[in-house]
Amino acid sequence: MKRVYFPVFGSGLGHAARMVALASKLVELGFEVAFSSYYEAADYVEQRGFVCFRVPRLDVGWTAAGKFEGLLKTSKRLPWHIATFIRQTVVERKIMKRWRPDLVISDSRLSAVIAAKSLSLKCFVVTNQLRILLPPKKRSKRTKPIERFFNEILGKLWNLADRIFFPDLPPPLTVSEENLWWISAVRKKAEYIGFLIQPPKKSLTELEDVLLKLGLSRDKPIVFIQVSGPAFTKPALLRKLLKASTYLKDFQVVVSEGRVKGSTEVKRIDSVYYFEWCPINEQLMQLSDILVVRGGHSTLGLALLIGKPMLIIPIADHSEQFSNTIKMIKLGAALWLDPLTSSPEDILESLRRLYVDGTYRDRVKGLSSLAARYDGLSRLVEAVVEALR
């Protein structure tokens, strides 16, 4: 039995969710799989029934307001980050020597790539973020050459992998264009394959059962709010959204907090239907008229495939989410609000605009048809089978 090992970036759930989707397909084909990660992603993987080795946590810091802690504080912790990266690499090497995988598939974990190649193991990379960008407010024409130089060096390290797969649409529709384009070091090994997380095919009866269970009506528009991302970034936004919900009398509002170990039972908070962990996430995305989401890549990809107009409220100062958000606006699929300065009235106005202005619905449906041409999950399964023949 061939073994496939998945080292997964642990902040947020998007990386883990798409690798769990791939691992599930491989298990059906008779492969043995295991993961490594940390924090919420490790909890999520274990909740899905897979073995997950715990490795040292490596992530940026967050403030109480739910924003990136800033360059100064991050730079002061740089020695600690470097030491943790080295520890992570050493731990990964030990796990690989013990578990002996036939293929390592690293989702955005460079330490695992270095560990795999030091052991001469086959290694794939799946990532929507090759480049590290400065926070939006710190970027300028003067900083871009520095960014590019640094990211070309990173690109050479990513290029240690045998294959690199971008779970995104090819240019010019690439959602993570700022994080993937312009790295010459990886061009020969990289392939755009489309989004990995595909919307489940639910019958009309199943969707109507969800409406009935929650007591939702087809007579009023449904807004589904999915608060994804690292746990530290959620409380401030959740408070703002719940406050804003008192203004949203024209809408039916369902909120998913995205707490991995939270209750799956729906609660009522005033007029809002509230899940700590929503077990019918995809069904609600399909039933909704508008989605309110963060700027995470996996969430945006799934929303595009389902074909729903979006209000995006990215994590403050999060360069990747901000660049994803800007691209979605360029594509005509979304509006966005600043998580720190937006008011409840701003949220109401944006939702009304998305609902009344049909151009957003038309545009996102067209993009959905284009995105559906690419089955990233099937392509990646095919690549794994080819590599392990």
Image: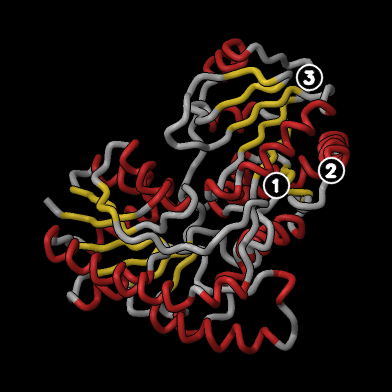
**Residue 248 location in percent, x, y?**
82, 27
Neighbour tally class for label 3: few under 14, some 14-19, many 20 plus, Cα within 10 Å:
few
Q: Residue at x 77, y 40 (%)?
A: 361
Q: Look at mark 1 in the image and give the residue it sits on.
A: 366
Closer to the eye: label 2 or 1:
2
- Distance of label 2 from label 1 (alpha carbons): 31 Å
Q: Of the residues shown, which amino acid type is indicated by label 1?
A: Gly
Q: Of the residues shown, which amino acid type is indicated by label 2?
A: Ser
- Distance of label 1 from label 3 (alpha carbons): 24 Å
**Tag 2–tag 1 contact (CB < 8 Å):** no
Q: Look at mark 3 in the image and give the residue it sits on.
A: 220
Identify the image quadrant of the C terminus: bottom left
Closer to the eye: label 1 or 3:
3
Does the image show residue 272? yes
Q: Residue at x 71, y 45 (%)?
A: 364
Q: Residue at x 48, y 24 (%)?
A: 264
Q: Of the residues shown, which amino acid type is indicated by label 3?
A: Lys
**Residue 22 location in percent, x, y?**
35, 48
**Residue 214 location in percent, x, y?**
61, 14
Neighbour tally class for label 2: few under 14, some 14-19, many 20 plus, Cα within 10 Å:
some
Closer to the eye: label 2 or 3:
2
Which mark is drawn over residue 343? 2
Mark 1 vs 3, N-terminal side: 3
Quadrant position of residue 58: bottom left
Q: Residue at x 53, y 50 (%)?
A: 230
